[in-house]
Image: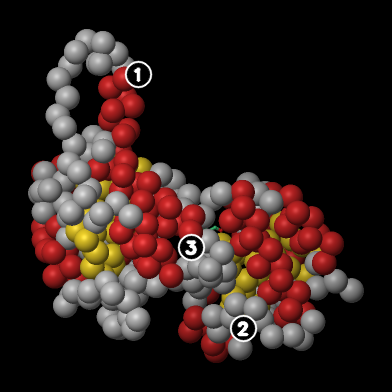
Amino acid sequence: MKPEILVMAPSPSPAVMAQFDVHFTCHHVWRLPADEHAAFIATVGAGVRALATTGTIGMDAALAARLPRLELVAVNGIGVDAVDFELTRARGIRVTNTPGVLTDDVADLAVALLLAAARRIPALDHYVRGGQWQARVPLQPARTLRGKTAGIYGFGRIGKAVAQRLAGFGMALRYFQPNVVAATDVPRSASLLALAQESDYLVVCAPGGAATRGMIGPAVLAALGPQGTLINVARGSIVDEAALVAALAAGTLGAAGLDVFANEPEVPVALAALPNVVLTPHVGSLTVETRHAMGQLVIDNLLAHFAGAPLLTPVQ
Ligand code: 8YV
């Protein structure tokens, strides 16, 4: 008999979706409207041995309570901050994620947002499409990246990949995270506040969760300053979103490029109304190639688990 798994979200890769159904008896939660999810999970949950979930859905206590035979949570993403680890530890449930395969695309998007914010691409696109060019509306020049400092908060795989790319633009680099990173030429600032003070661009690449919640608040945003730009491709929870909107609206922060938000898919109306922000809908890893690789890693972890083999990318 094939193991039963609960699939919370689809992969855009047809090959990945085909493998799910070949190897497992799948309960595809995502095929139902959101208001039917709880009832569906209550019906099938008793037989479920593994959960295929995403970085943002994760697994909370309410979901886990419906899955009494759960052995493995396979996260299709690098971030595991939405998984209740106290609970998985207590119940001996293993957890996997998809590190490595999404690094380049997420770093690319961070750079794309930085460039778009620095060179004001969305506003200029609007300027051309809206006929303002033809109407000869005066344009202010943007600021160059060359010689400016990018501070990277969270210097893991993605942070390092962002640094590598930005070095190519002639930017100076710094980083901050609590533990010192060995074998890097990039200097570490004394604190997150110091990093913001020393940077023109603050690029957030840190993991979400309790340790980073609200770390980018009024003081850090003020330190980044009126010429400063915040880029976030990590988790919305790291930024105090109300403080961010207030700083951008008041001009005490220059600009922002955001792929992640505190309460996705909700985006504060006041944030979306600002001209000095570039917004994308949490798509750092959303390319055909990367989503296929992530989905394949989910499948391979599931197969390894049910074959009694070592997990490929265990978190716990
Ligand atoms: C995805 C992510 O949005 O990797 C992560 O932690 O947030 C993203 O890549 C998500 O997990 C896709 O399933």
Q: Nearer the viewer, mark 2 or mark 3?
A: 3
Q: Which of the numbered marks, if any, corresponds to residue 278?
A: none
Q: What's the distance in space between the residues labelled 1 and 2, CA to CA?
A: 53 Å
N-term-proximal mark, 3 vs 1: 3
Name the one closer to the observer, 211 or 107: 107
Q: Amino acid at mark 2?
A: Ile
Q: Secondary structure at mark 2?
A: loop
Q: Which residue is mark 3?
A: 103
Count residues near mark 1 (Cα–Cα under 10 Å), then give few for <14, some for 14-19, many for 20+.
few
Count residues near mark 2 (Cα–Cα under 10 Å), then give few for <14, some for 14-19, many for 20+.
some
Q: Which residue is mark 1?
A: 129
The picture quadrant where one finds residue 17 is bottom right
N-term-proximal mark, 1 vs 2: 2
The picture quadrant where one finds residue 141 is top left
N-term-proximal mark, 2 vs 3: 2
Coloring scheme of the render?
A: secondary structure
Q: Which of the numbered marks, if any, corresponds to residue 93?
A: 2
Name the one closer to the observer, 191 or 166: 166
Residue that appears at 29% across and 13% down: 131
Q: Amino acid at mark 3?
A: Thr
Q: What's the distance in space between the residues labelled 3 and 1, CA to CA?
A: 34 Å
